[in-house]
Image (spheres, helix red, strand yellow):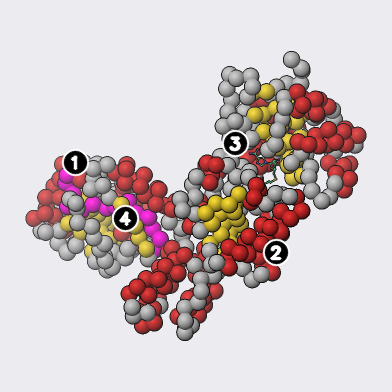
Amino acid sequence: MRLYPLFADLTGLPVLVVGGGHVAERKIDMLLASGASVLVGAPSLTPALAQLAEQGKVEHYAGTFQPTWLDHVWLVIAATDDRALNAQVAASASERRIFANVVDDPALSRFQVPAVVDRAPLTVAVSTGGAAPVIARRVREALETQLEHALGPLTALAQKHRARIMQRWPDLAERRAFYDWLHDGPVMALLRNARPDDAERELLEALNATASAAPKGSVQLVGAGPGDPGLLTLRALRALNQADVILHDSLVSVDVLALARRDAERIDVGKRCGGRHTQQEQIHQLLLDQTQLGRRVVRLKGGDPFVFGRGGEEMEFLRQHGIACEIVPGVTAAVACAAYAGIPLTHREHARSVHLLTGHGKESLEAMDWPALAQDHQTLAIYMGVARLEEFTQRLLEHGRRPDTPFVIVENGTLPQQRVLGGALHELPTLAKEHAIHPPALLIIGEVAALARDHAWFGIQNDAHRTLKLGDSTHD
Ligand code: SAH
């Protein structure tokens, strides 16, 4: 290791920044945030720096660099674009045993400023010792997505109660187990859910309990999105990284499942719980059994858990059984398929509203308000409709939707094998049959669907099988 890593407490200490441009501005922001007392030396300042000087937040030495500027400072940062001047600053600092950093010049720098992930009071610093700052930046980005923001308040909470935790668990192994619980258990979950007071209460309860409680299981209802793993939320990714067991639908793509913790148990409840009637009850029972084992359960659903996903029923069931439940939304099929087909679901000229409908389920098509749905300038996004395309089309036409209203069917949306079929409403059932559309497929009806022809961008190949009849209403 070429560099010795250290974190400096600069509170109240004078630090000099030479240079008054935008680079200096960034450095000064960070120094001020750490409580340093900043002196900035430069002939002229950016407007933002000039304002800081006016407000007395930094002190301005106007003019060209003087070694006497270094008289009382602990650190210096040279942030000018004049390499000779930067070298002079570094040399003067060296003579006085003051640590100097020259921005973007590791050879002239005695100390370097790392790339930082800020979860204050937790700070992660990344450095390549100047070898390749771009790589440090990439590593920082990766950490940024991995480390949830709740780590900040969690660390602060641990700090606040540190002495009591020491006292309660003098044994190191036991204390470690407690910190694991703190990080993995309900305290962290509550912080993540923006409930800091409840989190602290939970921590204090654990501190006061005579015996450590059996670990409580928990459930996260997580939306896996439509298939493209890039559409997973950061929160969903973190849930998958921490899960002990994942109960997933058959619809969840293998690429998404591949992102989960390697040793998490995966249960395909779509397959396992065959038999229409008992299916949902079996899933409920499984959720109950797994949480009673104290496990962190992720219930992973295609798209969004609350859009035609029975997430509501599962949440109610868990609530009835006193099991903590967190909901992580996902990108629902209508939103994703429309986007990946180049269709804006609403549009100032073509659609005032969008309706999410299902062709499946308790209420039959009878119950729908067809006169309302048949009005123009609105978008219908129909889930699970493949089996009932003919009925949908017929009813809309009967109630006066124009026969030339454009439609698009997106099959396997967002996946490499995505197919998009477009045409006019009156020919929808025929075209779908001709091109053998299979679930999962999402049907979009409305004026906006015509935009797919010009704006398709995903999965288009010179392969007739993939770009099907897009917006073209003539048969071939
Ligand atoms: N909760 C899910 C919907 C579950 S219902 C969500 O929010 O997306 C299942 C239906 O969703 C399928 O029949 C299909 O109509 C639609 N669907 C889900 N994923 C899809 C995909 N990748 N492409 C097209 N349609 C999809």
Out of 471 and 203, give the one closest to the viewer.
203
Lower sequence index among marks 2 and 1: 1
- The residue indicated by pointer 2 is 316
> In front of the other: label 3 or label 1?
3
Does mark 3's beta carbon lie closer than 8 Å to ligand 1? yes
Q: Can residue 53 be seen by looking at this rendering?
A: no
Q: In the image, what residue type sits under mark 1?
A: Arg
Can you tell me which quadrant of the image ligand 1 is in?
A: top right
Q: From mark 4 to mark 2, how far is it between C-alphas? A: 43 Å
Lower sequence index among marks 3 and 4: 4
Quarter of the rendering occupied by the C terminus = top right
Q: Is residue 7 left or right of residue 392?
A: left
- The residue indicated by pointer 3 is 414
Q: In the image, what residue type sits under mark 3?
A: Thr
Lower sequence index among marks 1 and 4: 1
Lower sequence index among marks 3 and 2: 2
- The residue indicated by pointer 1 is 83
Lower sequence index among marks 3 and 1: 1
Q: Is residue 209 left or right of residue 81?
A: right
> In front of the other: label 2 or label 1?
2
Whether tag 4 and tag 2 are in contact, CB under 8 A, the answer is no
Q: Which residues are magenta?
A: 107-120
> Around disc 4, counting alpha carbons within 10 Å, would you say few (fewer than 14), some (14 to 19), or many (20 or more)?
some
> Around disc 2, counting alpha carbons within 10 Å, would you say few (fewer than 14), some (14 to 19), or many (20 or more)?
few
Q: From mark 2 to mark 1, how far is it between C-alphas? A: 66 Å
Q: Is residue 97 left or right of residue 422?
A: left
